[in-house]
Amino acid sequence: MLQKSSMRKSYPSAYRRILMADVGSAAPDFTLNGAVNQEDTEVSLSDYSGKNLVVLFYPLAFSPVCAEQVPDFNENLDAIRAKGADVIAINRDSTFAHKAWSQELGGVDFPLLADMNLEVSKQFGMALEEVGITTRGVFIVDKAGHIAFKHVENAPPDNTLSAAQVLGELDKLQ
């Protein structure tokens, strides 16, 4: 039988999927620092208790696909909030990088959170430790703090979830 450490080395992607937070399970609680536009912020999952929350994981600021996906969610933020939900985004970039990227994008009105050691990404099963980044994915945490929906992108960005698709998933929670 393989030990966890040898399984992790031999099959890192499979091991990550085993540890992934699953639909129906309690979302891992966390607290991270980050930025909303140019303002520092500290966010905990518990800050959104009683509210649906879209948790967007993305690999890197200043990358082409992320520079399409994050603005898409920002442009649809009012519609998401109208459905009783909010949005946060998590990756391994620093708060400084988030501020610079937000400025380049013309502002992002939801928290971009710095998971520099990938601890939160690991709790959700979203860390690609072998390359030191977060994989792309979307989780919806419901009002009770359970994962109601997840979409994890394991391939090239041909199946990146749009804000419109997330709005459809939020409709199912109403």
Image (cartoon, helix red, strand yellow):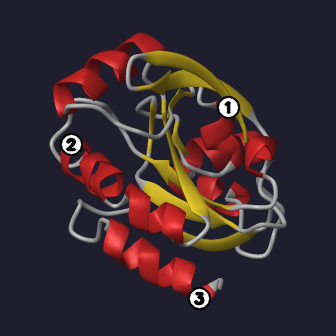
- Residue 155 is left or right of residue 143, and the answer is left
Q: Nearer the viewer, mark 2 or mark 3?
A: 3
Place of residue 21 in the rendered image (x, y in percent of width and height, measured from the top left): 71, 60
Circle nearer the N terminus (1, 2): 1
- Residue 149 is left or right of residue 153, and the answer is right
Say which mark, if any, is on residue 172: 3
- Residue 79 is left or right of residue 147, and the answer is left
What residue do we see at 48% from left, 52% from top?
56
Query: What amino acid is found at the position of numbered circle 1 in the picture?
Result: Val
Mark 2 lies on a secondary structure that is helix
From this view, report whether residue 20 is shown above or below residue 84. above
Quadrant for residue 77, please give it.
bottom left
Say which mark, if any, is on residue 70: none
- Residue 18 is left or right of residue 163, and the answer is right
Quadrant for residue 139, please give it.
bottom right
Instruction: Give whichever of 78, 8 is nearer the camera.
Output: 78
What residue do we see at 61% from left, 53% from top?
16
Place of residue 122 in the rendered image (x, y in percent of width and height, measured from the top left): 65, 41
Query: What amino acid is found at the position of numbered circle 2 in the picture?
Result: Ala
Sort mark 1 into few (<14), some (14-19) or many (20+) by Cα contacts within 10 Å.
some
Circle nearer the N terminus (2, 3): 2
Sort mark 3 into few (<14), some (14-19) or many (20+) by Cα contacts within 10 Å.
few
**Which residue, given by chain and number where applicable, does mark 1 sit on?**
43
Image quadrant for the C terminus? bottom right
Place of residue 43 in the rendered image (x, y in percent of width and height, measured from the top left): 67, 31
